[in-house]
Image: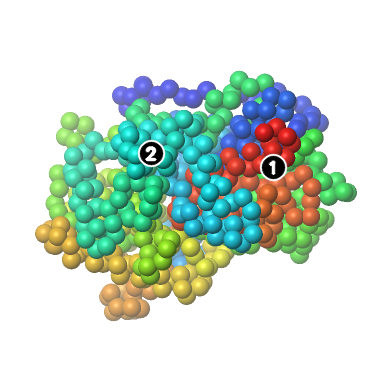
Amino acid sequence: MFFGRSVEMPRWPPDAPVRDGESFDFIIVGAGSAGAVLASRLSEVSEWRVLLLEAGGDPPIESVVPGLLGSLEHSRVDWNYSSVNDGWTAQAQRRRGRVSLPRGRMLGGTSSLNSMMYVRGNPADYNRWARKGFEGWDWESVFPYFLKSENLQDENLNNDPKYSPYHNTKGPMKVTVQESIDPNVVEKWDVLLDSLDEIGIKRIVDYNGPDQFGVSKCYFSHSAPPGVRSSTAQAFLAPAADRTNLFVLKNAFAKRVLIDDDREARGVEVEVDGEVLQFFAEKEVIVSAGALNNPKLLMASGIGPAKEVKKLGVEVCADLPVGYNLQDHLLVPIFFTGAPTKHIDEANYGPKVSLDYFPFPRLTGFFSVHNRARPELQLISYYFNQSSPLLQAAVNRSLNYDDEVVDSVEDESYKHEIFMLALVLLHPKSRGKVTVTSLDQAVPPQVYLGYLSQRDDLRLVLAGIDKLLQLTTTRYFRSVQSRLLRVDLPDCDNQHDYLGAVYWECYVRHMARSLWHQAGTCAMGRVLDAALRVRGLQRLRVVDASVMPALPSGNTNAPVIMMAERMADVIKKEYNEL
Ligand SMILES: Cc1cc2nc3c(=O)[nH]c(=O)nc-3n(C[C@H](O)[C@H](O)[C@H](O)COP(=O)(O)OP(=O)(O)OC[C@H]3O[C@@H](n4cnc5c(N)ncnc54)[C@H](O)[C@@H]3O)c2cc1C
């Protein structure tokens, strides 16, 4: 029993009794969103022996119970990375300019730690990939793989002929719509959806359905109550725990891919409990260590920008731009005041929150300020009752703003409810970079996010803010005399006219931070071919968020899972197993 709720932990696969020097058909590095799916799908072929190497261990209860996710960041199951201060953006972060970049270090990887929003992106995103020459990644080809993993547990959508063709009820990954046990939250969701509709951001039902433009309640990758996170560990590995051809080695840090003189990947060198072991792959090595960790593993194997690889004391095997092209969805919130509200569940002396759901009441949706055919901006809106302790958790702990920002928002929250509207730039032109300074396991990569280095990105966020400011003219917001909450940003407040153009630019730069969707550091085209094989080498693929040539219009977990689902079939076909 946990907080009055019984929790059935999934039965994770046991640590495999593998021996140094042992051979397998496939070796997969990283049991994250991509790696766990690949391991599960490839081991469906009973003749194939599949070794899955993971630097972390089993997910803890905080990962399994949706309402507890707040304690995962900065814990032992987080790689605990952060960005390099560029002196220009993210200056209102608690560690000035350094954006916290959590990454899951456990079975399921970041799918075991993330915020569970289930978003596929826009068909146009994938059609653009295909138009760039990446065959097989157009919407028509990828849509069945989104469906393959999905198990939608929403009666309304499943029984509605308008939406049901866009969903599946038979896949392993459970998806549900967020509910709340607080009647005020339910009412305010409605109010906000109507208010956004009034300013032209449509109220819709399902952003993964026929039309992605508009805002709706949020869909999450966890089960209906009792809520259990559908990480890839829970959805894909736990059901495969008894397979005798799937070998999962936990707490195993892959140091390098072993590449022979014919430029063929032969195996992986791994550190387990301080001991260095080697495993060999008869067919392929697949790297799924994620956008921030892949560069170290590949450069240690001689794959990367020649100059940088040599600096690490490694012989160059393939001179490729690994680590470049880093893309991320940056987020900028603005806050509006609302009405005074009752907020405390007096019986329990706490906010009315169910552990079965993502804890922060949230809506999400997509829009374009330039009438484009695909969305330019995502809106993630949070609602907080007056004095809600969840506000502190969101603004301080999750978004990591400094004390001045947190205090100014919190002070207002003692007087009335707060609407936080976070804008997300979906298709940044700016690029960052991941640099590797040491091959030591304990030395983190240097992450240069490169936010807003292209002026167009700044302009688009400002245009989005302009649109959202119209909210104060809508019926509900007017009725409660809502106003934009003045966030305490001394750098901007002291130098510029409040709410003038220069002030807003300063605001956006300071408040910009990550929605945690780093991608593109081993992108198709630059580093890989369309079948995700490393250029110039044999028997080595990369499959995870790092391979995306450009970010999709939305959160990245479902797209990564789709990519792994599709690649499993591509590989099976190549070896005549499909
Ligand atoms: C806080 C947060 C919230 C997010 N919220 C959402 C959300 O709500 N919805 C959404 O769609 N997306 C969300 N995302 C993004 C999404 O979860 C990621 O894009 C996705 O999980 C990335 O998958 P991946 O396979 O590329 O990497 P990962 O899932 O990170 O997998 C990499 C795996 O490799 C392991 N590994 C790394 N290096 C080594 C090594 N050398 N040896 C062995 N193992 C290694 C890691 O431990 C990890 O298990 C969020 C991300 C974060 C950080």
- In the image, is residue 243 above or below residue 526? above
Disc 2 element: helix
Percent x, y for residue 303? Answer: 75, 55
In-front residue for pair 78/382:
382
Residue lying furthest right in this view? Answer: 261
In-front residue for pair 70/125:
125
Question: In this rendering, would 116 be left or right of 362?
Answer: right
Q: Is residue 19 visible?
A: yes
For the point 53% across and 49% down, the residue is: 140
For the point 73% across and 25% down, the residue is: 47
Specify the label residue 164 is tagged with: 2
In-front residue for pair 294/263:
263
Q: Nearer the viewer, mark 1 or mark 2?
A: 2
**Mark 1 nearby-residue class (10 Å; few <14, some 14–19, many ≥20):** many
Q: Amino acid at mark 2?
A: Ser
Quadrant occupied by the N terminus:
top left
Residue lying furthest front in this view? Answer: 161
- In the image, is residue 395 above or below residue 266? below
For the point 41% across and 73% down, the residue is: 459
Q: Amino acid at mark 1?
A: Ile
Q: Which residue is mark 1?
A: 286
Percent x, y for residue 358? Answer: 35, 40
